[in-house]
């Protein structure tokens, strides 16, 4: 299977942000030195980030087992940096892992990665932009711009806990036999809900996303 690597591991501290629903956010993530332990944090609402030392403030909408780790590709950050004409350092999109050599947009829901020697992650879902993200970047119309590009990065659950640090190799261990990529799921959950039935039977999706798929199938049957 193909391999890439971790360029940086990024964690965030609580900071005030007017545009955040709670008035505070952990989206400002910055690279840290040395190995950082990653483990399943618990269900959404009670569990936060899976990355030790990382803060998630809005537990209702973020964190938990199905969003234990968020990764974004350096290659995609570089495209954004050129388009926005600004520096975009690792962690600026709120990602825990900034990667290189990996196609996150084309990753399949349920794809499994080994990171370093022992950490195993599973792709669960795309990142959906929110007003906190827009307020943090300070770019006019950012939610629409980010959605239109459809390069959202990927969330992961932790299958086997372990440490991670900058420079760790990332190996794609396995890919499921369906065609539900991060890109397809993102379009289905945002601009093209007609695609939702194509996510039926994708077991690695979080339960809250499976409910959206079931509702779409029920509407389809009713029509």
Image (cartoon, rainbow, N blue to C red):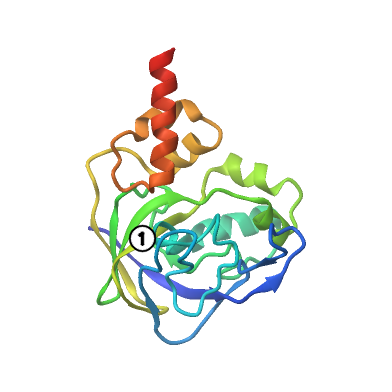
Q: Quadrant of residue 34?
A: bottom left
Q: Residue at x 60, y 67 (%)?
A: 57
Residue name at image x 66 percent, y 42 percent: 144
18 shown above or below 108: below
Residue 50 x %, y %: 42, 70
Disc 1 crowd rating (10 Å Cα; few below 14, some 14-19, many 20+) is many
Front residue (pair 158, 73): 158
Q: Quadrant of the N terminus?
A: bottom left
The residue drawn where x is 28% and y is 36% is: 201
Pick out the residue farthest to the front.
46
The furthest residue to the bottom: 34
Q: Position of residue 211 (x, y in %)?
A: 41, 38
Picture quadrant where residue 162 is located = bottom left
Q: Quadrant of the C terminus?
A: top left
Q: Is 165 placed above or below 6 here?
A: below
Q: Which residue is mark 1?
A: 157
- Between residue 192 and residue 169, name the one nearer to us: 192
Residue 15 percent coordinates (x, y): 69, 73
- Element carrying mark 1: strand
Residue 202 screen position, x and y as percent: 30, 40
The residue shown at (56%, 69%) is: 91
Q: Where is 116 relative to 79, above or below? A: below
Q: In the shown orientation, is residue 14 left or right of residue 95? A: right
141 relative position to 93: left or right: right
């Amino acid at each position: 299977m193909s391999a890439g690597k971790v360029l940086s591991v990024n964690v965030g501290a609580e900071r005030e942000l007017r545009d955040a629903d709670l008035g505070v956010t952990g989206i400002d993530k910055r690279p840290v030195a040395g190995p950082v332990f990653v483990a399943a944090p618990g269900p959404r609402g009670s569990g936060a980030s899976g990355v030790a030392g990382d803060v998630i403030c809005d537990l209702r909408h973020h964190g938990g087992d199905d969003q234990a780790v968020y990764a974004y590709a350096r290659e995609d950050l570089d495209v954004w940096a050129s388009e926005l004409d600004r520096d975009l350092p690792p962690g600026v999109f709120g990602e825990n892992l900034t990667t290189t050599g990996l196609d996150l947009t084309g990753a399949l829901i349920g794809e499994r990665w080994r990171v370093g020697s022992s950490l195993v992650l599973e792709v669960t879902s795309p990142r959906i932009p929110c007003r906190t993200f827009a307020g943090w970047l300070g770019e006019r119309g950012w939610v629409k711009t980010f959605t239109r590009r459809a390069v959202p990065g990927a969330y992961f659950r932790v299958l086997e806990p372990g440490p991670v640090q900058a420079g760790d190799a990332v190996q794609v261990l396995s890919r499921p036999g369906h065609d539900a990529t991060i890109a397809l799921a993102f379009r289905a959950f945002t601009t093209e809900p007609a695609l939702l039935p194509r996510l039926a039977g994708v077991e690695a999706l979080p339960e809250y996303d499976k409910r959206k798929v079931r509702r779409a199938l029920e509407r389809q049957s009713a029509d």
